């Protein structure tokens, strides 16, 4: 299923909630690929937003606030699609 990579069925003992450890979208444009990954920051608070091109270029953004993460993901994904990238 596009957009989902690894779902951890672990139940949080403190909150009793299911959670995703990592979500991955794959974008394609004219044979080029971008891997767009959102995951928890294991080294501190917040999240990591990682974009990796098929050429090996990697960009990592550290985001502490969940609202900012959602806004940034929405903006960047819309920009990718506006630039001709397709999810798939």
Image: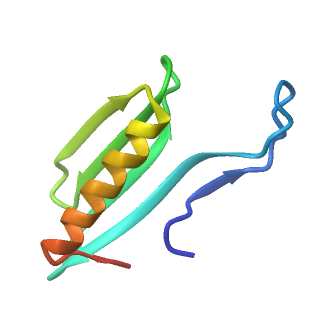
- Viewer-proximal residue among 14 and 8: 14
- Viewer-proximal residue among 72 and 42: 72
- Viewer-proximal residue among 36 and 83: 83
Find the residue positioned furthest to the bottom.
30
Q: Quadrant of the N terminus?
A: bottom right
In the rendered image, which quarter is residue 36 located in?
bottom left
Percent across and percent down for residue 73 are 35, 52
Q: Is residue 22 above or below residue 12?
A: below
Which residue corresponds to the image point at 49% horizontal and 36% vertical from the top-left? Answer: 66
Q: Is residue 64 above or below residue 7?
A: above
Percent across and percent down for residue 77 are 29, 62
Horizontal arrangement in the rendering, residue 44 relative to residue 78 (left or right): right
Horizontal arrangement in the rendering, residue 57 relative to residue 41 (left or right): left
In the rendered image, which quarter is residue 10 located in?
top right
Horizontal arrangement in the rendering, residue 79 relative to residue 10 (left or right): left
Percent across and percent down for residue 70 are 42, 47
Q: How is the image coloured?
A: rainbow
Which residue corresponds to the image point at 50% horizontal and 73% vertical from the top-left? Answer: 2
Q: Is residue 74 above or below residue 70?
A: below
Horizontal arrangement in the rendering, residue 69 relative to residue 33 (left or right): right
Which residue corresponds to the image point at 43% horizontal and 25% vertical from the top-left? Answer: 64
- Viewer-proximal residue among 50 and 63: 63
Percent across and percent down for residue 7 are 67, 54
């Amino acid at each position: 299923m596009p957009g989902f990579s690894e779902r951890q069925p672990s139940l949080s003992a403190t909150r009793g909630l299911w959670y995703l450890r990592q979500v991955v979208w794959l974008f394609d444009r004219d044979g080029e690929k971008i891997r767009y990954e959102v995951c928890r920051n294991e080294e501190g608070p917040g999240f990591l937003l990682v974009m990796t091109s098929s050429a090996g270029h990697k960009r990592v953004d550290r985001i502490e606030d969940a609202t900012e993460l959602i806004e940034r993901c929405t903006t960047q994904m819309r920009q990718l699609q506006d630039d001709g990238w397709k999810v798939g």
